[in-house]
Image (tube, rainbow, N blue to C red):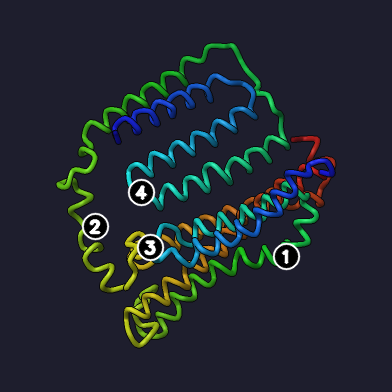
Amino acid sequence: MRHHFILRIVAKLLIPLILLFGLYVQFHGDFGPGGGFQAGVIFGAGFILYALVFGVEKAGNVARLTIVRVMVAAGLLLYGSVGVVSLLLGGNYLDYSVLADDPVHGQHLGIFLIEVGVGITVAAVMITIFFTFASRGRS
Amino acid sequence: MEHLIVIVLLSFLAITAVAVVMLHDLFAVVMLFGIYSLLTAAIFLVLDAVDVAFTEAAVGAGISTVLMLATLALTARKEKTSLRFAPIPLLVVTITGAALVYGTLDMPRYGDPTAAIHQHVAPDYLQRGPRETGIPNVVTSVLASYRGYDTLGEVTVIFTAGVGVMMLLGSSRRGTKRTRGKR
């Protein structure tokens, strides 16, 4: 990897923009195209690009595998617990209208939370799958 | 003009598919799969399905290409070819293809307002969505709120895929040389 100067510089310039774009897609999904799934994939792709250019070990220092593995489950748990909270507040499972005083605000909050959950799980799964494949090739 | 774009994209799609079948260099095949997904994303864009196009471009052209390249690094780059003629697979593929083409004959025309899909719950969502959820993008409100169970199921599928890959490939330190010889 010592020789790929252009690749490394371009990757360094692009990765922050990719991650920023991922966050934009995540939080702008209510208004434009996008949402948790696409954002998670873009966010994961940023890390995968880093791992491709700088090596899997260095990428492992940035995104620790144990933390990423916890995030795989955390996103899904966040999604499911939004449903449990709406159950406890007297609504149906995943009925967000009861989450706030105003049903429209409740819907907004619920959709925001489950999109974040989707994004976390998708990004973590993409990173995990790539790392698992890549580290198997080395051993 | 739109018809012309769609025809060009679809013929590129067909050419790419034939090239994927004909080539034996798997690296080139993976690259062509990426191009195929990008063309599909462009077609979705022409059909005004921006959210689907977005996903197709990110997942199909981006992530799957990388994952298939990672798989190629673990296996061989050339396809093992057999020159033997196999009649049963050819028969199965022909019958399935014919059945699929026959199925499309019953489908409503593209953009037909009387099609079943536009009569059932879609008008209801379009009317209620912006009022009840306050979200301008109807796709998001349908996916996240009205079809929240389905999306939960999709996320569970992705979660299961991640866990499955971790369990199958992640434990490379355990049971080292013997199992690797068998592969």
N-terminal of the two: label 2 or label 3? 2
Q: Are marks 2 and 3 on the same chain?
A: yes
Q: What element carries label 3?
A: helix
**Horizontal side of residue A122 vs B53, given as left or right:** right
Taking B92 as reference, is B171 left or right? right
* Element marked by disc 1: helix
Q: Residue at x 32, y 43 (%)?
A: B47
Q: Which of A122 and B10 is in front in this view?
A: B10
Q: Are marks 1 and 3 on the same chain?
A: no
Q: Which mark is residue B145?
A: none
Is B45 on the left or on the right of A77, as rendered? left
Front of the two marks 2 and 4: 4
Residue indicated by mark 4: B49
Q: What residue type is labelled 3?
A: Thr
Tag 2–tag 3 contact (CB < 8 Å): no
Q: What's under tag 1, amino acid-wise? A: Thr
The residue positioned 42% from the left and 47% from the top of the image is: B53
Instruction: Report the mark closest to the observer, 2 or 3.
Output: 3
Task: Give the residue pinned by disc 2.
Answer: B122
| Type of the residue with mark 2 | Ala
